[in-house]
Image: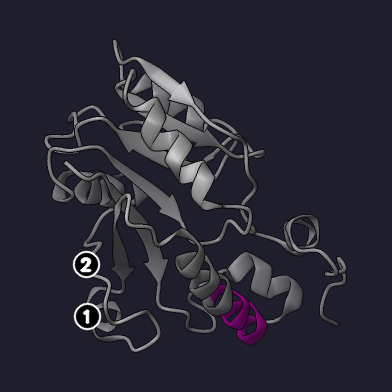
Amino acid sequence: MRPTLVVMLKEPRPGRVKTRLGRDIGMVEAAWWFRHQSAALLRRIEDPRWRLALAVTPDRAGLQSRVWPGHLPRWAQGRGDLGARMARMLRRAGSGPVCVIGADIPGIRRYHIAQAFAALGAHDAVFGPAGDGGYWLAGLKHGAPAPRSLFRNVRWSGPHALEDTIASLPGFRIAQVAELHDVDTIDDLSMTTPGVRATSKV
């Protein structure tokens, strides 16, 4: 069975996406950055080795948006916190291997995705750690049914997100792949994007 890669995407509206970055560089500029970063990411990671699906929010606007490539399937993320929405996407992907990633990580390349799926050959779950204690990728050997304990009691947006998520999978054989960095602030942007200076909007 061909594995599934799910990309979590927000409609790139100013003030609704990358708001922490927007406080540094402006909300319009942050939305523009996310739109172009996401488009570049989708072009890089589309590959015949896996099925690529877009998990979109807000549900109605995301399903109808012209921003994202029309040939890729779109799934509404639905309600709940990040953990509830990610678990829903993992289950929807079916019984085969599935990985979920965010769209705000400029460093993701196809070989990172291939390494994650390869790790699921001998492990039950895989994570791609981020430098801030979170993670840029979460994957399961069997997406459906995802364990009910998955993502319970996770302290999101903090240094314990990966640690808490691993704790929600007792008894699982867990692998980790390369550490990458997402972009939440202008300092992150300057670190991950060559030529960008850490200069706040005034």
Residue occupying image coordinates x 70% and y 81%: 26
Magenta residues span: 27-34
In which quadrant is the C terminus drawn?
bottom right
- For mark 2, does the 10 Å Cα neighbourhood hold few (<14), some (14 to 19), or many (20 or more) residues? many
For mark 1, what is the residue?
A: 60
Residue occupying image coordinates x 74% and y 77%: 25
Which type of secondary structure does the marked residue at label 2 adopt?
A: strand
Residue 15, percent from left and from top: 53, 80
Residue occupying image coordinates x 45% and y 44%: 113
Q: Residue furthest front?
A: 48
Nearer the observer, 191 or 45 = 45
Residue occupying image coordinates x 57% and y 71%: 37
Query: In the rendered image, which quarter is residue 174 located in?
Result: top left
**Residue 29 painted magenta:** yes
Q: Is residue 151 visible?
A: no
- Most frequent secondary structure within the magenta stretch: helix
**Residue 1 painted magenta:** no
For mark 2, what is the residue?
A: 76
Q: CA distance from mark 1 to mark 2?
A: 8 Å
Residue 84, percent from left and from top: 26, 47
Residue type, numbered disc 2 = Ala
Which type of secondary structure does the marked residue at label 1 adopt?
A: helix
Q: Is residue 175 visible?
A: yes
Q: Are marks 1 and 2 in contact (CB under 8 Å)?
A: yes
